[in-house]
Image (tube, rainbow, N blue to C red):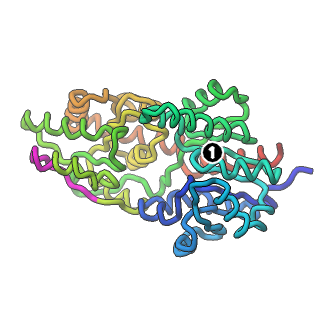
Amino acid sequence: MTKKLEDTTLTLFFTGGVTLKTWAQVGNLDREVEIYKRLSNHLKRINFVAYGGKQDKIYSNRIGAIKLLPIKWYKRQPLTILHLLLKHHPEIRDTDIFKTNQIPGSEIPVWIKKHFGKKLITRCGYLYSYFVRKKATAKKEIENAVRLEKEAFTAADLGVVTSKWQKDIIIKDYNINREKIKVIPNYVLTDVFKPYLVSSKDFDLIYVGRSGEQKNLKNLFKALHCLKSKNKKVSLLMIGGSSRDRELRDITIQHNLDVTFKDNVPNFKLPLFLNRAKVFILPSNHEGHPKALIEAMSCGLPCIGCDVTGVNEVIDHMETGYLCNTNYESIAEAIDSVLFDELLHRHMGKNAREYVLSNYSLDKIFKMEMEALREVVGG
């Protein structure tokens, strides 16, 4: 007999070692929880397995009716599993579907599925093996990432990824049935991330996110310096982990760039800052399915991104945004082309907003999530 969704319990496992506190500190807690709050109205119960122990209980009032199952994360997988079962065995036993949030940490729900005979949705927001290959130098590290990812998708009753290019890789590399992998993109709260009427723009550019080689921010700063040398001084607002990058701050001082650094902002307050800028920029060397980009697009901002995996699937050049190469000369040219063209601003900003409404609204993604759950429950 097929079980009804209203009688189904779903347990989400956080990324290995990640806590509710982590989500809160980077400003993402409310955004990440929103879809599960909505799903909880249609399921018997939703549980969160987070790895902050008792400290995570401080944030339990922000997750609505979702039940928090806080435990500690141990480097040795068996200890984490043992802690989970000792603390929350009744909730694990009564779960119908386990779900991963990312591939790191997926070994825990995979083990539990095998021993409890439950359903498993392996979900990832970014393709772990792809990102490890991009940054790893040790062959063993790459092999471990591929093994972990393969085991997670092979064990799954359903795999969920955020973009088609990720689906194609999983099917090819791990010989997974195409019907077992669904594309469910990241969502945007389009009633929060929307265009605001502002009297003036305080910044020419805005970037939201962390730093690191993947984000290619040194070339962005070189591009700003290049434009300044041509008497085109461009102001930039940096929000998030990138604001703590000492090297970027030193470059700003060395070349007297007009850059404002601001630490993490709660997700629901980001639109206030996005709407104060003329153009959003994401100069990354590669991405998964970048939330910051689609949130900026939802605010009607003209967006510049590099023509790389994960970005060029979202931006249609000169229509929903502007694509350039990853070198600083191309980034500088893109900024110059977009920033000072008001007609292009309006054209791309309007199209970007409409594209997000059509493809990434919470209502649309919620329906896709419900369909995935029905498929697993009925399978």
Q: Residue furthest right?
A: 1
Give the position of the C terminus as an image quadrant.
top right
Judged from the image, the secondary structure of the residue bearing numbered disc 1 is strand
Q: Which residue is mark 1?
A: 123
Q: How many marks?
A: 1
Q: Position of residue 107 (x, y in %)?
A: 65, 48
In reply to whether residue 170 is colored magenta, the answer given is no
Q: Residue at x 23, y 52 (%)?
A: 246
| Residue 251, placed above or below residue 273 | above
In the foreground, 287 or 43: 287
Q: Is residue 303 visible?
A: no
Q: Residue at x 51, y 33 (%)?
A: 130
Q: Residue at x 65, y 35 (%)?
A: 150
What range of the chain is rendered magenta?
252-262
In the foreground, 168 or 371: 168
In the foreground, 278 or 27: 27
